[in-house]
Image (cartoon, helix red, strand yellow):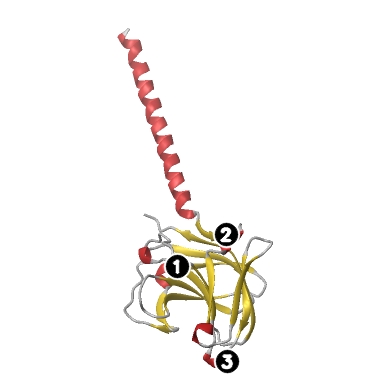
């Protein structure tokens, strides 16, 4: 009896070990996939999604630029209008209404956009009393082409009225808004479509 029982016990232990190894390998794969896949911050599959955004143009300073937003039939947000340099103006922008975005150090933002060949800025906002303050990263569009652009949080610069502000490091956990601005000093019509904005989490 003893001689026959011993191999059975060994076999049970081996089966258990194999099962554990399989479970561990599955767990590792899941974690890797989670790190690679982007988490959607903003998309535009319903009208309510666009209402989370608002335009802020140079009219607040006397300018005459006209920037607007709408949801398209293809479920994208279209930021469009006319840039004017009159009355010391020169910018049109759209931004989200304030809410915590739960971003972390090392994260990368990814945006899928279709533009008009002009240069835009992606802006990040934090709570504070400083006027016209944001963290900014420039990006170029390709006329009438959908492209995906990556924005590592470490690459954003602090700016106020478009000028770099030194010694103002970005604390990702404080970010409570995101926006897109056109201020390339080229008067005329513009159009930028945004399909979605995601965050790719930093690996832990």
> At which x and y percent is residue 139?
53, 75
**Which residue in the structure is indicated by mark 1?**
177
Label whose residue precedes the other's in the sequence (2 or 3): 2
Quarter where residue 68 is shown: bottom right
Q: Quadrant of the N terminus?
A: top left
Secondary structure type for disc 2:
helix
Residue placed at 63% from the left, 82% from the top?
82
Tell whether 103 sits left or right of 72.
left
The image shows residue 130, relative to residue 46, as above or below, that is below
Secondary structure type for disc 3:
helix
Residue placed at 51% from the left, 64% from the top?
110
> At which x and y percent is residue 61?
49, 86
The image shows residue 101, relative to residue 114, as above or below, that is above
Cα separation between marks 1 and 2: 17 Å
Q: Residue furthest bottom?
A: 87
Quarter where residue 161 is shown: bottom left
Tell whether 137 sits left or right of 70.
left
Quarter where residue 185 is shown: bottom right
For the residue pair 26 and 59, the one nearer the viewer reads as: 59
**Which residue in the structure is indicated by mark 3?**
86
Cα separation between marks 1 and 3: 28 Å
Label whose residue precedes the other's in the sequence (1 or 3): 3
Dot 1: few (<14), some (14–19), or many (≥20) neighbours within 10 Å? Answer: some
Label drawn at residue 48: 2
């Amino acid at each position: 009896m003893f001689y026959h029982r011993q191999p059975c016990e060994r076999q049970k232990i081996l089966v258990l070990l194999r099962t554990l190894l399989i479970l561990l390998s599955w767990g590792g794969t899941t974690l890797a996939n989670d790190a690679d896949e982007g988490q959607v911050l903003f998309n535009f599959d319903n009208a309510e999604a666009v209402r989370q955004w608002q335009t802020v143009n140079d009219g607040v300073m006397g300018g005459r630029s006209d920037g607007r937003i709408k949801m398209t039939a293809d479920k994208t947000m279209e930021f469009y209008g006319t840039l004017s340099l009159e009355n010391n103006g020169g910018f049109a922008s759209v931004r989200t209404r304030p809410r915590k975005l739960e971003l972390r150090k090392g994260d990368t933002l990814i945006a899928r956009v279709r533009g008009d060949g002009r240069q835009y800025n992606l802006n990040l906002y934090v709570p504070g009393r400083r006027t016209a303050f944001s963290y900014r990263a420039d990006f170029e569009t390709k006329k009438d082409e959908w492209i995906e652009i990556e924005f590592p949080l470490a690459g954003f610069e602090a700016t106020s009225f478009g000028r770099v502000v030194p010694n103002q490091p970005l604390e990702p956990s404080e970010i409570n808004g995101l926006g897109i601005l056109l201020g390339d000093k080229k008067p005329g019509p513009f159009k930028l479509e945004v399909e979605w904005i995601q965050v790719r989490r930093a690996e832990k």
